[in-house]
Image (spheres, rainbow, N blue to C red):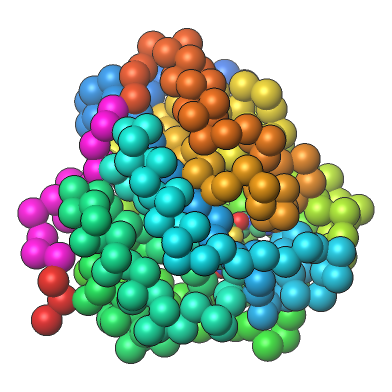
């Protein structure tokens, strides 16, 4: 089958065989990409109208016990200047964010042991008490099921944990020996079962990634049915073992974005900062390829440069308000508009948030 036919088949059946995925991902050309983008964009319009949801991301600690080979805040990077925001600082980011119109706060950090369950649940309860109309998304890595349950009970609504790659052998080449693919997958299953709107995702073009590993990613996403999928190009960081590798391609990232949208029409799909870093118009292109979420940075300006997952990360010098004005303008060029809304996944809109 031609790539064009495979894209049409995916649109109809919402899945492909492993061989079909490999074929599509290895052989597509610009025309196929344009077709996938058009289908994906139309699906996004049917699902969300003209709307693009904004989430304010607060990078509240870059202290991390893990040593992921690709990541700039890995524990063995001695050049990373470490920081941890206080509860008060995080709350003032939320205050500013609320004033600017955000109704979702994404709290992201390295795996920082200081933020144990007590500390995190306290923080979540405070945010939810002050901003009951806002959603809280966590992105704080692998924890026990009990810990995830406690965070959910405290009021967290969503959880982002990229699976990074659904290919176990590939996972082992991206992570040190003390991290395990099985545990990451266990975390994702627990999060979904507990009731979080759960996001998985992967980097595109990470070292040793093949069409076969991306095919496994697509099959995993198809089966897991996440509420959100975060994907962006891999970008090397100078102080990591992957410093010498090239960044992932914009075209492949956009194509995969479109395929995810076609496969899961109602999924929440951000055009990521990494995409905006490898291409000045990357996020606009992401929206044109089917993305419907943007995640402007709400972290205090003085710490932004320290949350360097990869080199040349954009928006590290701006104030939150500036970031939003810039992104609003960018969204308008795509013919869409941003909305003030929690932007929940449709399957979760009416769920009772209190875990029993
Ligand atoms: N500690 C949290 C947050 C990790 S940072 C967790 O484990 O989920 C968020 C995401 O940034 C990671 O999941 C990874 O996919 C991405 N990332 C890290 N280093 C990157 C790099 N060099 N290039 C592109 N994306 C990267």
Say which of 125 and 189 sits in front. Answer: 125
Write down which quadrant ligand 1 falls in: bottom right
Left or right of 238? Residue 252 is left
Note whether 329 is above or below 173 in the view shown.
Answer: above
Say which of 225 and 102 sits in front. Answer: 102
In the image, residue 258 lies in the stretch drawn in magenta: no
Note whether 118 is above or below 168 in the view shown.
Answer: below
Query: Residue at image x 36%, y 69%?
Result: 123
Provide residue 172's location: percent of width, then percent of height. Answer: 69, 76
Provide residue 248's location: percent of width, then percent of height. Answer: 72, 43
Q: Which residues are magenta?
A: 339-353
Query: Residue at image x 41%, y 41%?
Result: 96
Quadrant for the C terminus, please.
Answer: bottom left
Provide residue 229's location: percent of width, then percent of height. Answer: 43, 50
Residue 104 visible in the current orientation: yes
Residue 5 visible in the current orientation: no
Query: Residue at image x 67%, y 47%?
Result: 302
Type of secondary structure dominating the magenta stretch? loop
Say which of 206 and 29 sits in front. Answer: 206
């Amino acid at each position: 089958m031609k790539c064009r036919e495979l894209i049409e088949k995916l649109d109809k059946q919402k899945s492909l065989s492993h061989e079909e995925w490999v074929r599509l991902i290895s052989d597509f050309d610009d025309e196929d990409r344009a077709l996938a983008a058009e289908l994906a964009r139309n699906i996004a319009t049917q699902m969300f109208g003209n709307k693009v949801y904004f989430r304010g991301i607060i990078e509240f600690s870059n202290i991390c016990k893990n040593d992921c080979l690709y990541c700039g805040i890995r524990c063995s990077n001695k050049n990373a200047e470490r920081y941890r925001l206080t509860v008060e600082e995080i709350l003032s980011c939320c205050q500013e964010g609320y004033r600017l119109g955000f109704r979702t706060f994404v709290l992201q950090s390295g795996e920082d042991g200081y933020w144990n369950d007590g500390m995190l649940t306290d923080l979540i309860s405070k945010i939810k008490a002050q901003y009951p109309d806002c959603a809280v998304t966590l992105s704080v890595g692998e924890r026990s099921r009990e810990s995830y349950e406690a965070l959910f009970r405290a009021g967290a609504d969503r959880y982002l944990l990229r699976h990074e790659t659904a290919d176990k052998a590939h996972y082992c080449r991206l992570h040190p020996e003390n991290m395990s693919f099985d545990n990451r997958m266990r975390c994702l299953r627990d999060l979904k079962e507990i009731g979080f709107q759960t996001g998985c995702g992967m980097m595109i073009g990470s070292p040793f990634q093949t069409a076969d590993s991306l095919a496994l990613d697509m099959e995993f996403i198809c089966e897991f049915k996440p509420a959100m999928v975060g994907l962006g190009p891999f970008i090397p960081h100078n102080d990591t073992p992957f410093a010498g590798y090239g960044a992932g391609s914009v075209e492949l990232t956009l194509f995969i974005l479109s395929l995810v949208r076609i496969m899961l029409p109602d999924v929440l799909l951000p055009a990521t900062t990494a995409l905006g870093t490898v291409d000045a118009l990357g996020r606009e292109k992401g929206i044109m390829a089917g993305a419907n979420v943007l995640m402007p940075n709400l972290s205090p300006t003085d710490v932004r440069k320290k949350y360097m997952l990869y080199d040349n990360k954009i928006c590290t010098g701006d104030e939150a308000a500036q970031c939003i004005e810039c992104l609003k303008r960018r969204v308008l060029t795509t013919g869409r508009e941003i909305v003030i809304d929690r932007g929940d996944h449709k399957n979760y809109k009416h769920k009772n948030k209190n875990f029993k």
